[in-house]
Image (tube, rainbow, N blue to C red):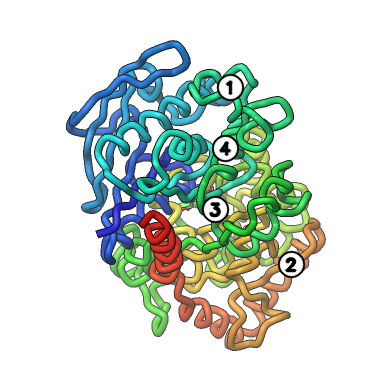
Amino acid sequence: MKKIRFVTSEAAPLAKTGGLADVCGTLPLILNQQNYNTSIIMPWYKNLEAKKIDRSIVRLGNEPRYAIYGKTTINGVDVILIKDQQFFNREEYYGTDDGPYPDNDRRFIFFSRAAVQYISKHDSSAVVHAHDWFTGLVPLYLRSRYKRSRFRSVFTIHNLQHQGIFPASSFYLSNLPAYRFSPRWTEFYGNLNLMKAGITAADRLTTVSPTYAEEIQTQQFGEGLEGVIREENKKLTGIINGIDTEIWNSETDPYLEEDEQFSASDISGKKRLKSNLLQEYGLKNGSDLPLIGTVSRLAQQKGIDMLLDMRQELSRLPARWIFLGTGEPELEAGLKQWEREFPDRVRAVIDFDEKLAHRIVAASDIYCMPSRFEPCGLNQLYCAQYGTVPVVHRTGGLADTVADFDESDQNQATGFSFKNLSPENLKKKIEQAVNLYDSKPATWKQLQQNGFERDFSWKKSANQYAKIYDSLVEEMK
Ligand code: ADP
């Protein structure tokens, strides 16, 4: 059995703020159905239950700290949790409304180092798979301190926008030799950049879609690291995320009532579900109109502000809108404002609610996702499971997974996508979708069926990761 260690700041269902958690919660399970022994290492956040199994001293600069290790499982996959008296026993994972926690450098340098110490103590050899900036030092510690015949690393970029940039003075917390603080490894315009550490030190680099893998090598999407990524592009692969097709499944979705569940061949349950949802949320006279849904972090990245700017015109369309999301206060307030202006047509639920997320994705006819950039995106994949037709900006994973109605064969098209990001182009595509829904039911049905036929399960993607792990195991021999 090949040993794989995931090191991550979140894994569903134990801790989740976004797609990173879905990937880290599901991929290990799929790998373990093959010839791998995969486990997860993550912080021991508040309220997580686990059995204490080990402890060690982890140095953070001059300061020795105690790491306590606990063990639990997610769907049969072992999870090692790392506790520190102060760092993780907090209400939030990364920060509050006032901003990121000011000691995030200490928290995640500590976590990365404690994870590597655990692995080196318990594994004679392993492939270590680290995720996003929180764990960017993991590949560098492995490379710096251990024989290459014991450990190799994979680093995955889930979102390049957040890089973990700290003042140069934070570098001493890592106890790495001074030469590692150079532009070759971790230095970024005089600061410490933990994402860069992962990118430069890992043996393989992946990101979550082929298009995003190309985009991050350009100035437009590279967030300043495009040059570094171009340097490393021989080790870079884009692998689209899979989805958990047991949970996101129109026939068995536990968040739908039995008579609201439906299949590709009989979608009458979808109509009942939509009608129930419209009623629950006070959206009037909408049964025959398309329901447009969005479930999202409310961040600049997601492009919701463009909808808000056009809300007067959009509200005139024969459609109903439902939003679920939390995030930036201006976007939350903007959606609430839109709801106040058009109370019969628009509902904005400011919350994080797994059940409602499922119900919106399943009930909607159209799903709107105008992200400025989107490394992979999950909701457009979920939509395909429910006959929900996405309208997206053609970027990153959205470009790889939604086939545009105008530009694809009618037997292939799954939604609507526009290339150049602008409010006008977005509006045109929404109008086109609303129009088609109304005027050409047979064509609409075809789009839904094309979606149902797509296979976004983890199997294909897991095989691509497996190939990478296998090549690293070969190199260690
Ligand atoms: P990102 O990771 O950038 O937030 P993704 O599309 O990759 O975007 O993943 C977002 C995940 O989080 C999806 O599973 C989505 O359904 C979920 N999600 C986002 N906001 C909410 C919310 N308010 N309530 C429930 N689930 C949400």
The disc labelled 3 sits on which kind of residue?
Answer: Leu
CB of mark 2 within 8 Å of CB of mark 4? no
Q: Residue at x 44, y 28 (%)?
A: 92
| Secondary element at image label 4 | helix
Q: Residue at x 69, y 51 (%)?
A: 231
Residue tagged by mark 2?
418
Of discs 2 and 4, which sits in the foreground? 4
Per the rendering, the mark at residue 98 is: 1
Locate residue 196, reporting x and y percent.
61, 39
Q: Between residues 431 and 462, which one lies in front from this camera angle?
A: 462
Task: For residue 293, say whether it is visible.
Answer: no
The disc labelled 4 sits on which kind of residue?
Answer: Ala
Q: Between residues 291 and 178, which one lies in front from this camera angle?
A: 178
Quarter of the rendering containing residue 28 = bottom left
The disc labelled 2 sits on which kind of residue?
Answer: Phe
Residue tagged by mark 4?
197
| Secondary element at image label 3 | strand
| Secondary element at image label 1 | loop
Locate residue 342, reporting x and y percent.
66, 49
Per the rendering, the mark at residue 248 is: none
Residue tagged by mark 3?
205
Locate residue 413, reporting x and y percent.
61, 80
- Which mark is first along the chain, 1 or 4? 1
- Measured in 3D between alpha carbons, the distance from the residue under mark 1 to the one under mark 3, in whole angstroms, is 33 Å
The disc labelled 1 sits on which kind of residue?
Answer: Asp
Of discs 3 and 2, which sits in the foreground? 3
Locate residue 68, reporting x and y percent.
27, 25
